[in-house]
Image (cartoon, helix red, strand yellow):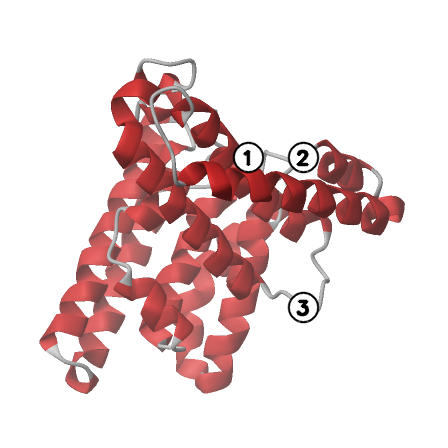
Amino acid sequence: LSSLHLAHLDPSSAQFYTSTGVAYQNHGLAGFKSTLSCMDSENSTALFAFSIITIILALAVSVTTPEAPESTPSEALQSVVELLRGVAVIIDTSQEGIRSGIFGVLLEPERGPTSNHDFLQREELESAMARLVHRSDQLSKYVGPLQQQLYISCIHSLQNAFDHVMAYHNISMVLAWPVTISKKLMERFQQKDPMAQLIWMHYGVLLLAINNRWWGKGFGARLIDNVSETLHAIDEEWTIYTQWARDCAKAVMEQ
């Protein structure tokens, strides 16, 4: 993690520091994976801490090597979501021990590291969520009722995540949201489903709330840009549905 921070601070040496950081990460992951199979009350806190660091590393690699051709923002998102699900498994298995330990504060929804959410305006947010629902309704004739229900439930869940960030001023729901929704939304995203891509692109706006962290700076903006390009290539009519997210990304990156 320190190597990736140095890569962020010194872009001219980013390749060297990133390679070093990834090497350390791979070495640590070997022990982490072997210990997961025998998780207990004594090592659960350490496993939880390492899993959080692994997520930050995944975000940081994308931040320090944004032009890496082998990994697009969309692919990086998929990796991060998979890691977040792993954290959720650790929490579910050893929640009591983690809550009573030194990292228990991270599981309290009203507490946690502060977010960068000044760019969010209530009226604009509600309009954007309404447009998502409208677009989903437009596409309902092309998908079955279960698919439509998936879209709507995830949109409402995302709205709640935005509300949480604005109410409590912390980033807990920014990282927790992907594991609170059905895995099917990511599966649809991987299958290039345009509506799923649009919803995940709006999650990119939520990720802008960690833009004040060196390991998260620019991640949400690049995801928004990447998915917007994909949707616009399908049809220009998608432009109106990506506008708010693109405006938010521009505002945050100009701060």
Is tag 3's residue or tag 1's residue first in the polypeptide sequence? Answer: 1
Residue 99, given in percent of the width and then of the height, sits at 31, 19
Q: CA distance from mark 3 to mark 1?
A: 22 Å
In the rendered view, does 206 fall on the left or right side of 127?
right
Residue 1, disc = 2
Calculate the distance from the C-alpha at mark 2 to the C-alpha at mark 3: 21 Å
Residue 227 seen from this side: yes
Badge 3 marks a residue whose secondary structure is loop
Q: Quadrant of the N terminus?
A: top right
Judged from the image, the secondary structure of the residue bearing numbered disc 2 is: loop
Point 78% across, 41% down: residue: 7
Query: Toward which corner of the image does residue 252 lie, by quadrant?
Result: top right
Residue 149 image-quadrant placement? bottom left
In the displayed structure, would residue 30 be above or below residue 155?
A: above
User: 221 above or below 52?
Assistant: below
Which residue type carries mark 2? Leu
Residue drawn 57% across the image and 61% down it: 73
Q: Which mark is residue 53?
A: 1
Dot 3 amino acid type = Glu
| Nearer-N-terminus badge (1/2) | 2
